[in-house]
């Protein structure tokens, strides 16, 4: 009996002792420290030992990746980039109300983005780029009204872009690309008037540009490529004077290419291929003197090629193939001396290859196939001595294959079938060390293939 009582009282004492310890401990405990320890505990693998000095012997402000406000020792940032961290994101991070920046990009974090991050009202930057985060984008992030950068690119997030993010009007950079997002762009997206960089490419987004979109006139880079977006490209995009890259390729946009784009003279890339765009190639695009890449191929464009494009002196890649383009190739294009690739195949082009094209000496890739082009090849075609691919099959070219072609020593692929070439096959072709594909069938040539 006595022994039993003694045992019980010992138990009681022990419990009293332990709970007083707990009380003492919690009275000195720091919720920020607790949250960081919870973050560490949710990391299941840390092969580089990035968190190895996250120990009690070191003040947490001196832990790898942590910065504190020097005066208050409040945690202001967590930066753990490319550390091969595996595990999940602890919801306890939401307890660090002073956090301004979380950069945990290029790791292997999985699980969902904790909705509790919506409690971090001081956040200006949230970067989870290149992880394996899944689930939806929590609507609570819309509470973080000071966010300037939100980069959730290259994860496996699903669901739609939450409307609540329209409240984050300080946002300048927004990255959602390479996820599994669906739904349409939020109708309120035009509230994000400070947005400069928006990338939501490679998702399953649907619907058309919401009317408010035209307010995003500060955009410098817009990439919505590789989605299922439809509807027209708003003509007001011509007011986006800061635009340097516009990537809307691989969608289902229809209607015309806005002529107003000719006012976006800072454009270096205009890439709107593989849509259902109709109408003309606007003459106004000739104003885009900084343009390096103009990809309009695989649409339903039905005009002629405007000679004004010859004013786009920076052009390196010009792709107008797979459209319904008519007329002849403007000789003015021969002045685009930076051009490396010219794709005009699968159109309804007629006329001859302009003599001026012998000046395109930087050309690597020339494709005119599947048109109704005629006449001879320029005698000096050999001046295109950088040419690697010459794809001109299925036209009505006549005359001989100019012997100067042997000067194109880098030639890898020359496809000349289904034309009306005559004469002999130039013997010099046998000297071209890299020429692995050379087709001539469907012509009236004589002599043997060298
Ligand atoms: C962090 O380390 C530095 C140098 O070792 C030390 O001076 C400083 O007091 C430490 N900070 C905190 C908050 O303990
Ligand atoms: C913690 O580890 C990092 C390297 O991972 C090192 O740069 C840093 O100086 C360490 N901090 C302390 C206080 O030892
Ligand atoms: C910290 O966050 C967790 C998870 O969100 C929550 O359960 C807990 O009550 C918070 N603790 C403190 C001290 O705020
Ligand atoms: C934006 O914030 C206001 C209050 O600050 C709130 O009433 C509203 O619901 C928020 N909008 C969205 C779309 O979350
Ligand atoms: C997201 O981060 C990656 C890697 O730093 C960067 O390349 C990309 O431009 C960022 N996206 C946005 C929208 O800031
Ligand atoms: C994306 O969603 C589709 C359809 O829901 C699914 O089949 C696919 O596996 C998902 N991809 C990833 C990487 O989660
Ligand atoms: C947008 O993201 C995709 C996928 O990560 C990337 O390939 C592309 O270069 C980005 N666009 C721009 C304009 O930076
Ligand atoms: C924007 O563009 C439209 C049509 O291209 C034009 O009528 C309008 O005046 C422009 N608005 C602003 C604010 O520049
Ligand atoms: C055009 O780009 C240059 C830098 O490439 C920049 O300095 C200039 O401000 C831009 N112009 C506009 C209107 O955004
Ligand atoms: C090639 O360019 C030079 C210099 O601009 C010019 O004088 C010449 O006429 C051009 N050649 C052809 C065939 O157009
Ligand atoms: C042959 O190629 C050289 C450069 O390798 C070039 O300077 C020359 O003009 C070319 N000649 C002809 C006839 O195309
Ligand atoms: C042939 O191809 C090889 C491998 O791509 C390259 O290194 C070499 O420079 C090429 N030769 C010529 C004449 O282009």
Image (cartoon, rainbow, N blue to C red):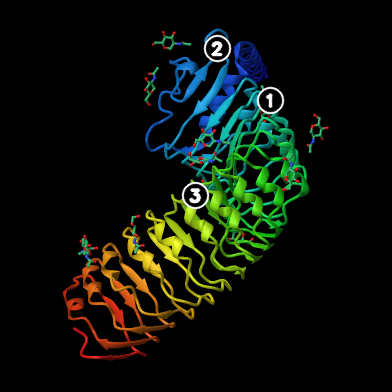
Where is residue 61? Give x, y as percent.
49, 16
From the Cβ of disc 2, is ligand 1 less than 8 Å away? yes
Q: Which residue is mark 1?
A: 121
Report whether residue 248 is seen.
no
Image side of residue 33 versus residue 427, left or right: right
Image side of residue 19 versus residue 443, left or right: right
Where is residue 104? Give x, y as percent.
51, 35
Looking at the picture, tell me which residue is in the foreground, 396 or 200: 396
The mark lying in front, picked from 3 and 1, is 3
Dot 3 or dot 1, earlier in sequence: 1
Residues at marks 2 and 3, CA–CA distance in whole angstroms: 49 Å
Q: Which residue is mark 3?
A: 291
Residues at marks 1 and 2, CA–CA distance in whole angstroms: 18 Å
Rendered-image quadrant of the N terminus: top right
From the Cβ of disc 1, is ligand 4 less than 8 Å away? no
Q: Residues within 10 Å of mark 2 (few under 14, many from 20)?
A: few
Q: Residue at x 54, y 53 (%)?
A: 286
- Identify whether 197 is placed above or below 271: above
Q: Residue at x 63, y 64 (%)?
A: 280
Instruction: Give the label on residue 73, or none.
Output: 2
The mark lying in front, picked from 2 and 3, is 3
Image side of residue 125 versus residue 139, left or right: left
Q: How many marks?
A: 3
Dot 2 or dot 3, earlier in sequence: 2
Looking at the picture, tell me which residue is in the foreground, 41 or 134: 134
Q: Residues within 10 Å of mark 3 (few under 14, many from 20)?
A: many
Mark 2 lies on a secondary structure that is loop
Dot 1 or dot 2, earlier in sequence: 2
Residues at marks 3 and 1, CA–CA distance in whole angstroms: 41 Å
Where is residue 21? Give x, y as percent.
60, 13
């Amino acid at each position: 009996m006595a022994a039993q009582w003694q045992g019980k009282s010992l138990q009681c004492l022990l419990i009293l002792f332990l709970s007083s310890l707990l009380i003492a401990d919690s009275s000195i405990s720091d919720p920020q420290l607790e949250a960081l320890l919870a973050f560490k505990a949710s990391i299941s693998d840390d092969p580089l030992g990035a968190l190895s000095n996250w120990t009690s012997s070191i003040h947490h402000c001196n832990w790898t990746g942590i910065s504190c406000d020097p005066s208050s020792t409040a945690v202001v940032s967590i930066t753990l980039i490319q550390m091969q961290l595996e595990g999940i994101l602890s919801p306890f991070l939401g307890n660090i109300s002073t956090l301004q920046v979380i950069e945990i990009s290029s790791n292997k974090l999985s699980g969902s983005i904790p909705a509790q991050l919506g409690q971090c009202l001081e956040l200006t930057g949230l970067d989870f780029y290149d992880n394996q985060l899944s689930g939806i984008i929590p609507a609570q992030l819309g509470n973080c009204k000071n966010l300037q950068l939100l980069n959730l690119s290259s994860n496996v997030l699903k669901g739609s872009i939450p409307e609540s993010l329209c409240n984050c009007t300080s946002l300048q950079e927004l990255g959602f690309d390479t996820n599994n997002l669906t739904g349409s762009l939020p109708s309120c997206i035009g509230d994000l008037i400070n947005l400069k960089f928006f990338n939501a490419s490679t998702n399953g987004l649907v619907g058309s540009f919401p009317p408010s979109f035209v307010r995003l006139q500060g955009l410098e880079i817009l990439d919505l490529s590789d989605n299922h977006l439809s509807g027209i490209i708003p003509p007001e995009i011509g007011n986006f004077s800061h635009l340097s890259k516009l990537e809307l390729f691989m969608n289902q946009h229809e209607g015309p290419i806005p002529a107003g784009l000719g006012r976006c003279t800072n454009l270096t890339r205009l890439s709107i291929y593989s849509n259902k765009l109709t109408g003309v190639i606007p003459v106004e695009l000739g104003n885009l003197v900084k343009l390096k890449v103009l990809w309009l191929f695989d649409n339903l464009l039905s005009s002629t090629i405007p000679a004004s494009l010859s004013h786009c002196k920076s052009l390196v890649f010009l792709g107008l193939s797979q459209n319904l383009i008519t007329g002849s190739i403007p000789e003015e294009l021969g002045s685009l001396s930076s051009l490396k690739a010219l794709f005009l195949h699968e159109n309804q082009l007629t006329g001859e290859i302009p003599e001026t094209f012998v000046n395109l000496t930087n050309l690597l890739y020339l494709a005119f196939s599947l048109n109704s082009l005629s006449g001879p090849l320029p005698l000096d075609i050999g001046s295109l001595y950088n040419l690697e691919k010459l794809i001109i099959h299925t036209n009505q070219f006549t005359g001989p294959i100019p012997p100067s072609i042997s000067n194109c020593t880098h030639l890898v692929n020359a496809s000349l079938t289904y034309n009306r070439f005559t004469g002999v096959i130039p013997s010099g072709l046998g000297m071209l060390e890299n020429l692995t594909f050379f087709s001539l069938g469907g012509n009236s040539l004589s002599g043997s293939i060298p």
